[in-house]
Amino acid sequence: MPAILLLILYLALTLAPLALAWGQGLPPRGLWDEIASGLALTGFAILLVEFVLSGRFRSISGRIGLDVTMRYHQLLARTAAVLLLLHPFLYRTPFGIDLPHDPTSQLRLNGDAGAIAAGVLAWLLLCVLVLTAIFRRKLPYRYESWRIGHAVGAALLVLLAAYHTIFMGRYSAAPWLTGFWLALLALALGTLAFVYLVKPFVKRRHPYAVRSVRPIAERIWELTIEPAGPRALSFKAGQFVWLTVGHSPFSPYENPFSIASAPGQREIRFIIKESGDFTGSLDRIAPGTIAYLDGPHGSLTLDRHAAAKGIALIAGGVGIAPILSHLRDLAATGDKRPVILLYGNRIAEQIVWREELAVLTESLDLRIELVLSDPPPGWTGRTGMLDTDTVSGIFRSPDADDWVYLLCGPPAMMKAAETGLLSLGVPGRHILAERFDYD
Ligand SMILES: Cc1cc2nc3c(=O)[nH]c(=O)nc-3n(C[C@H](O)[C@H](O)[C@H](O)COP(=O)(O)OP(=O)(O)OC[C@H]3O[C@@H](n4cnc5c(N)ncnc54)[C@H](O)[C@@H]3O)c2cc1C
């Protein structure tokens, strides 16, 4: 879906409650009361749409990238939290007191004990959800436990908040607005059901089996899987999947990995760096272990850059995985455009598939620039960090802005590379990046 259409849809959904409230023509209250209601109406709508943003829908993330979608998810959740946490403190009208000049009770806050309790609980739960998301890495829980807790907590939060809104909100009691909230609530909870029940059910029908797991560089492994049935995964070079190995497709154990092999082959190869629970136990995976995929996802793809005069591939560490998929695909399709691979690592032992990279220079118009920050004696490649100067030095050319640039690696490296490219006048739309970390 085009980004502008997504934005219009988003604004329509999140601002609709304000319009539906305003359209009721209720007698005006003081400014602070109207601001408080406005914050609550908008904040709750943003919160409900958050479920869709985090639902891994390709129609949403396909264009802007899943990392950007998740950034918006985080940013908008915090915005909604500020609006919702603030709103109860802004009301100036009395609560539950009959006013002589207000026979229809329009100018005071109403609500039974249940609606108030639901609001207070939702308020507290919102604080917990936002804080545990921001400080997730400091908590003594596995990522999977946090994720399930986050999803269950979010579902409980919107149910409590919906009850509070409909039975206490001045405007939300009106049938149109109540209907709107119920529809948005169904969409939010339906998204959860889709992600945690429907998708795993579909995955279960297309199992894969591990073919091999082997170390290929320092603390880096290659995991190869192949479909158990006749259907091979259709994907584009540079995309990634969520991979479940040795668990039920309904389990929370899944990790995102870029596909390192080229499209069009039955087997799917991943390059995985040891970093935690799953990635640190790859040596214990036996061939034949069942695996499931959710994907393909991601927009680090060349399909919208067919007119690019050259292709620049910039990888740091295990960020080589999607880049290698591109190199293998470019070789398989006989692409004639010039390609430059800039590949940074700390030590030489971390460079993966060095022999294959050398062979690729024979079939592609490929120049390889290896950079090591801690080079061994006699190293003839580049040395130092893969920083802004390295990038702008290598890609400085008269037609630099006609190339497409694919970036994948540690956040600091990607930032430096992007800065270097922008300083050369490369338009931002020619720079594509995949982040391995959403925090
Ligand atoms: C789009 C994308 C592509 C990636 N491609 C590769 C790759 O090709 N090779 C590679 O080595 N690494 C890749 N990663 C990183 C890889 O997913 C993590 O290193 C891995 O999930 C860590 O899992 P763990 O159980 O070993 O460690 P844990 O200690 O359980 O997790 C470490 C961190 O990894 C992240 N993570 C774990 N599980 C998930 C999940 N289900 N969804 C999102 N984030 C999660 C969290 O930030 C977590 O804090 C990629 C990440 C992303 C987002």
Image: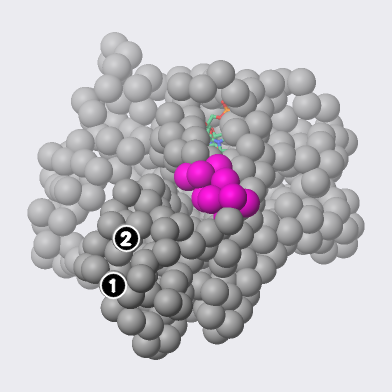
Crowding at dot 2, Cα within 10 Å, few <14 / some 14-19 / many 20+, comes out as: some
Magenta stretch: helix, strand or loop mostly: helix
Dot 1: element: loop
- Secondary structure of residue under mark 2: loop
Q: Quadrant of residue 248?
A: top right
- Give 258 or 349, whichever is nearer the viewer: 258
Highlighted magenta segment, given as a residue range: 113-123
Q: Amino acid at mark 2?
A: Thr
- Please report the residue visible at 10 percent of the width from the left and 54 percent of the height from the top: 423
Query: Is residue 204 rendered to the left or right of residue 333?
Result: right
The residue beneath circle 1 is: 29
Look at the image and say whether residue 427 sits in the magenta stretch: no
Q: Quadrant of the C terminus?
A: top left
Determine whether label 1 and label 2 are within 8 Å by CB.
yes
Membership of 120 in magenta stretch = yes
Q: Residues within 10 Å of mark 1 (few under 14, many from 20)?
A: some
Identify the residue at image location x=51%, y=44%: 120
Q: What residue did someone put label 2 on? A: 93
